Amino acid sequence: MERLMQYIWQHRLWPVADMATVDGERVSVIDPGRMNTDSGPDFFNAKLTIGGQMWAGDVEIHVRASDWYRHNHQGDKAYDSVVLHVVGKDDGRVTRSDGRVIPQLRMNCAPDFHEHYRVLVAGAATDLPCHGEIASLDPIHIHSWLDSLAYERLYNKTGRIEKYLEHFSGDWESVCYVTLARALGFGTNSEPFERLALSVPLKVLGKHSDSQLSLESLLFGQAGFLDNVAESDPYITLLKREYAFLSHKFSLPKPGRLGWKMARMRPANFPHRRIAFLALMAFGGFRLMSRICELRKVEDVARLFNAELIGYWSTHYTFNSPLDTPQAVALGRNAVDVLTINTVIPLLHAYGTATGDNSMCDTAIGMLHRLRPESNSVVTLFARHGLKCDDAFTSQALIQLRREYCEPRKCLYCRIGHKMLSKRVKSSR
């Protein structure tokens, strides 16, 4: 409740006619001040008039006036600069450390304001509480917000890459290797894939890049998939022997339980063939980053991942689970698009940012605009409520909106939620 009151004060979402102290003195807010997220009053350097007199100082907000004493502000000199105490319930006067009474204002909102906010933040996790009003908002307002969200998501990915660049002391191929591995988890298994790649350094794979069996044994062994599998096939026996030798040779510590998720998942989405694909990308030497830097068109991306699985993994989804018909193609078109969005584009953008090559950053953004939109539950949810998605730039924005604002119910920080709450206030004036 207090957070909502701070939000209302910060964005001036109160009926102007109700702005008066509990003693009846007219209050006019010139500047609500700067919100403080640390200790001390909630808003610094506010400017307002009370009863016709100009005041400059801080503002403190509480649900109840008595919270002032519950928090011991009356004896804290840091609160002597408070010129206005804003409360939801006026249950007593408050004073500074010298005993002087602080002017107090009871915050009045539109009759249904609090209820509308409650509906927004208390909806079911699978719901979209604002769905009834999205279609009525100005399209320019929505598109501006989606543009910001798409960049926000790309910058988040770029930030993760920059942290790995520091971890790997500027080795872009190692960064690319871990980024690709994470993307091969396709959301559900992203964390396990990332931890797997970190447990098998690229330099270790590089020492045996001429042997597909060695590469697969290292990755499957570190993934934990060789621990309990029955040796019903000569290939599995060879993998186990090779892994026992190589893990000892390189003193590789097992990463422990990685938390692979396969429940209620189609066999085609199991991690096994994707691990085999990762091994295939390292065969002959991992040089994906250098190839990404040469890209200039999204149409050229497909050749980066145009690989066919051979041997055991062309006929199996998992160990001891053969396919009905052989399937050599490692990744379908949709999977390639996802890898482009989560590997190629962030790496291009991060490399362009690190080297000051703005054209590379522009190429990354252009690819998002030219790629087809992702097909997932998030895009479907927003489409059902009137938000059309024509490209990957927009689908990335919708995923960011859903994951970072809708699901944690940060409606106060969402421009759509803010616009809707603002309309509630204006309609009551």
Image (cartoon, helix red, strand yellow):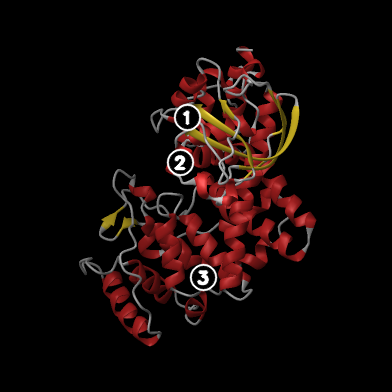
Q: Residue 380 carries which label?
A: none
Where on the picture, by quarter, is residue 305?
bottom right
Q: Earlier in the sequence, mark 2 or mark 3?
A: 2
What is the CA distance from the residue labelled 1 to the residue labelled 2?
Answer: 10 Å
Q: Work out whether mark 1 precedes mark 2 in sequence or the reverse, and give the earlier one.
A: 2
Q: Name the residue under label 1.
A: 92
Graded by Cα atoms within 10 Å as few (under 14), some (14 to 19) or many (20 or more), the crowding at tag 3 reads many
Can residue 279 be seen? yes
| Circle 1 residues within 10 Å: few <14, some 14–19, many ≥20 | few
- Return the residue nearer the eye: 96 or 31: 96
The reply to whether the C-beta atoms of the residues labelled 1 and 2 are less than 8 Å apart is yes
Q: In this view, does 79 lie to the left or right of 359?
A: left
Badge number at residue 282: 3
Residue underneath mark 2: 69
Q: Which one is nearer the viewer's eye here, 322 or 114?
A: 114
Between circles 2 and 3, the one closer to the viewer is 2
Which residue is situated farthest in the front direction here? 99
Secondary element under disc 3, as helix, strand or loop, is helix
- Cβ atoms under marks 1 and 3 closer than 8 Å: no
The crowd level at tag 2 (other Cα within 10 Å; few <14, some 14-19, many 20+) is some
Q: Quadrant of the C terminus?
A: top right
Distance CA(mark 2)–CA(mark 3): 65 Å
Q: Residue 319 appears at what percent x and percent y?
A: 28, 61
Question: SS for tag 1?
Answer: loop
Q: Type of residue at label 2? A: Tyr
Q: In this view, does 96 lie to the left or right of 243?
A: right
Q: How far apart are marks 1 and 3 (CA)?
A: 71 Å
Residue 30: x %, y % from top left: 74, 31
Query: As shown in the figure, which amino acid type bears the numbered disc 1?
Result: Gly
Is tag 1's residue or tag 3's residue first in the polypeptide sequence?
1
Residue 44 is situated, as x and y percent measured from the top left of the image, at: 66, 44
